Image: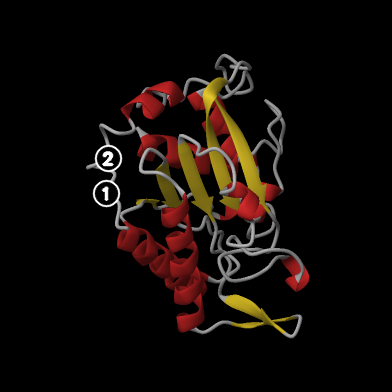
């Protein structure tokens, strides 16, 4: 099924209103950045499937490890449920080839459909696993994994769920792989009519801890990009 968010605006108007995502300035950076704190969450929720850029972070207001998804959820006054694992992706099954790919995280889809479903990932998918070892992935393998998971999401969620595919947030390391994987993910999102959020430029050297993972400034930069796109 090829979806079009523009064509589905009427169908999801109630869900989007419940999420209360607006184009107003970023009002809720939880006190640490001068804004009020929203602790009461709305009934509508957001599901995030992701890698370590989601998994390593928390939902504690003002924490140096507060995740991009936490800022987005608090801005929307919505509960956020994360299904994320370090080292994983569309193709790769977790760090040291132990864990699950996005498609194997069936609990994210075997639940009541959320108002919004966000996929954050691809950073690890320039490599896959073979015989328990990380090995370089071919373009065809990446394309197959991305298309397969997005087809599963399309088949599993109702048109009332707003599906967001994020371009993988990418720090300064491995720029060639960034261009390749981001292009494949964007093409997959376009193929299904899913919304694509380009995160290019959110993680320069000063916004990452180790060349890959965002610090607090990096998480804020990703969150601002997502919130602006969702307006």
- Disc 2 crowd rating (10 Å Cα; few below 14, some 14-19, many 20+) is some
Residue 217 can be seen in this image = no
**Which element is circle 2 on?**
loop
- Residue contact between numbered discs 1 and 2, judged by CB atoms under 8 Å: yes
Look at 55% across and 41% down and name the residue there. 47
Q: In front here: 30 or 59?
A: 59
Q: Which residue is mark 1?
A: 4
Q: Position of residue 99 (x, y in %)?
A: 74, 64
- Disc 1 crowd rating (10 Å Cα; few below 14, some 14-19, many 20+) is some
Quarter of the image that includes the N terminus: bottom left
The reply, left or right, for residue 119 in relation to residue 101 is left
Relative to 116, is 185 above or below?
A: below
- The image quarter containing residue 112 is top right
- The image quarter containing residue 87 is bottom right
**Which element is circle 1 on?**
loop
Relative to 192, is 112 above or below?
A: above
Look at 41% across and 69% down and name the residue there. 184
Residue 182 can be seen in this image = yes
Look at 30% across and 52% down and name the residue there. 3
Q: Position of residue 107 (x, y in %)?
A: 64, 49
Look at 46% across and 38% down and name the residue there. 116
Q: Position of residue 185 (x, y in %)?
A: 43, 64
Query: How far apart are the alpha carbons under marks 1 and 2?
Result: 6 Å
Q: Position of residue 34 (x, y in %)?
A: 57, 17
Q: Residue furthest left?
A: 7
Relative to 201, is 142 above or below?
A: below
Give me the disc on residue 120: none
Quarter of the image that includes the C terminus: top left
The reply, left or right, for residue 165 in relation to residue 1 is right
Q: Which residue is mark 2?
A: 8
């Amino acid at each position: 099924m090829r979806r079009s968010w523009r064509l589905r605006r009427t169908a999801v108007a109630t869900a989007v209103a419940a999420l209360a995502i607006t184009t107003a300035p970023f009002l809720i950076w939880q006190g640490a950045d001068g804004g009020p704190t929203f602790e009461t969450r709305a009934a509508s929720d957001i599901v995030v499937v992701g890698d370590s850029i989601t998994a390593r972070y928390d939902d504690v207001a003002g924490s140096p490890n507060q995740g991009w998804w936490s800022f987005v959820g608090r801005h929307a006054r919505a509960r956020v449920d994360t299904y994320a694992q370090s080292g994983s992706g569309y193709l790769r099954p977790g760090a040291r080839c132990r864990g699950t790919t996005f498609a194997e995280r069936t609990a994210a889809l075997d639940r009541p459909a959320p108002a919004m479903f966000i996929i954050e990932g691809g950073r690890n998918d320039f490599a896959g696993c073979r015989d328990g070892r990380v090995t370089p992935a071919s373009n065809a393998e990446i394309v197959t994994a991305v298309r397969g998971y997005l087809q599963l999401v399309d088949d599993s969620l109702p048109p009332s769920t707003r599906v967001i595919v994020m371009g993988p947030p990418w720090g300064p390391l491995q720029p060639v792989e960034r261009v390749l994987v981001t292009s494949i993910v964007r093409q997959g999102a376009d193929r299904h009519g899913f919304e694509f959020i380009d995160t290019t430029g959110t993680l320069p050297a000063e916004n990452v801890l180790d060349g890959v993972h965002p610090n607090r400034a990096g998480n804020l930069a990703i969150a601002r990009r997502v919130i602006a796109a969702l307006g």
